[in-house]
Amino acid sequence: MKRRLFIAVSLLTLSISSALAADPIHYAPQPPAIQAGSWVLMDYTTGQILTAGNEHQQRNPASLTKLMTGYVVDRAIDSHRITPDDMVTVGQDAWAKGNPVFDGSSLMFLKAGERVSVHDLSRGLIVDSGNDACVALADYVAGGQPQFVKMMNDYVQKLNLRDTHFETVHGLDAPGQHSSAFDLAVLSRAIIHGEPDFYHMYSEKSLTWNGITQQNRNGLLWDKSLSVDGLKTGHTSGAGFNLIASAVDGQRRLIAVIMGAESPKGREDQARKLLHWGQQNFDTVQILHNGKQVGSERIWYGDKETISLGTDQDFWLALPKSEVPNIKAKYVLDKKELEAPIAAHQRVGEIELYDRDKVVAHWPLVTLESVGKGGMFSRLSDYLHHKA
């Protein structure tokens, strides 16, 4: 069946919209060599993986676990079970004094019995990576750590994180606890996309609590060569050095995940390498616009002679900059001819995206308008022309 070329892709202004994670783009530039156990570079808008290594390997997430802890807390806020201004009474289990679980670990330095808002505890979780803040929030939201861990794993299922299972609210080493660079990129994307009011905390460089000032351990927040605004670091003896960094370049955003680096500086160097490579070599391109016509076709036996066709969604792709001139989009109809009556938004074919000669994505082609049944004389005229 004849394929109709309707667009050669051009770069367009980026905005958040429905996104499609397409097949890997062919002819991608050579990625950098990364020194870590596993890694991922994701385009935020589309969810595409630009490069990765051992991305589904199950590893100890360490304090990257706190991304899910914060995500669960924010879901509780969204569902109006709690509010950011709720005051939480810190329990004995969230006090580091005399608690061997917290020995040598990251703390907000809470004290048993003090009252702290959900908002401030969330800052302590994110900026200080406070294990005590995680416990206090878990107690308040779910009534205890086991109940909260169940909620974390429920969201693992909802987000389809196939490499992930949690056993703790804070990420200290525990048998059976694991995640992957891929899953943590997906979780990070969900946090950024869903909660702008919550996400800004990930860019805070320091927090003072009970007279103790601590710096955010994500050193890339101070890197003037990148506009990094989150997300999180993590380290245990079993995990090595982990880091998730999200950087904005104009209106584009990339998410880099590093797991199992050899040092704090090493995880920053490797994430920086991924982010610079992605920014230098890729563009995020809008391929299709919701409601925009991509073609028109003859329609028989209707009250109009032609019908407008397009898509009812916005679609984006992250593409190597060198490949943008080679991207073409075509459409093909499911049937040889279209006949009225036909409703708006009805599928009538498929849009195909080509990188040179390879199909890299495809989407439904739909009608952008309805066409009613024509009058008797117009239908008769169509019949005579059609059969001639």
Image (cartoon, rainbow, N blue to C red):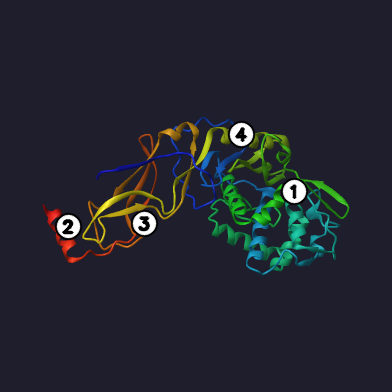
The mark that comes first in sequence, 2 or 3, is: 3
> Please, what secondary structure does the residue beneath circle 3 have?
loop
Which image quadrant is residue 348 in?
A: bottom left
What is the CA distance from the residue labelled 2 to the residue labelled 3?
22 Å
What is the CA distance from the residue labelled 3 to the residue labelled 4?
40 Å
Pick out the residue farthest to the right. 211
Q: Position of residue 222 (x, y in %)?
A: 74, 39
Q: Residue at x 63, y 60 (%)?
A: 152
Residue 109: mark: none
The amino acid beneath tag 2 is Asp
Structural crowding at the residue carrying mark 2, measured as other residues with C-alpha within 10 Å and reported as few (<14), some (14–19) or many (≥20): some
Q: Which residue matches tag 2?
A: 382
The amino acid beneath tag 4 is His
Q: Is residue 373 visible?
A: yes
The mark that comes first in sequence, 4 or 2, is: 4
Eye-nearest disc, 2 or 3: 2
What is the CA distance from the residue labelled 1 to the residue labelled 4?
22 Å
Q: Which residue matches tag 4?
A: 276
Q: Which residue matches tag 3?
A: 368
Q: Residue at x 59, y 40 (%)?
A: 39
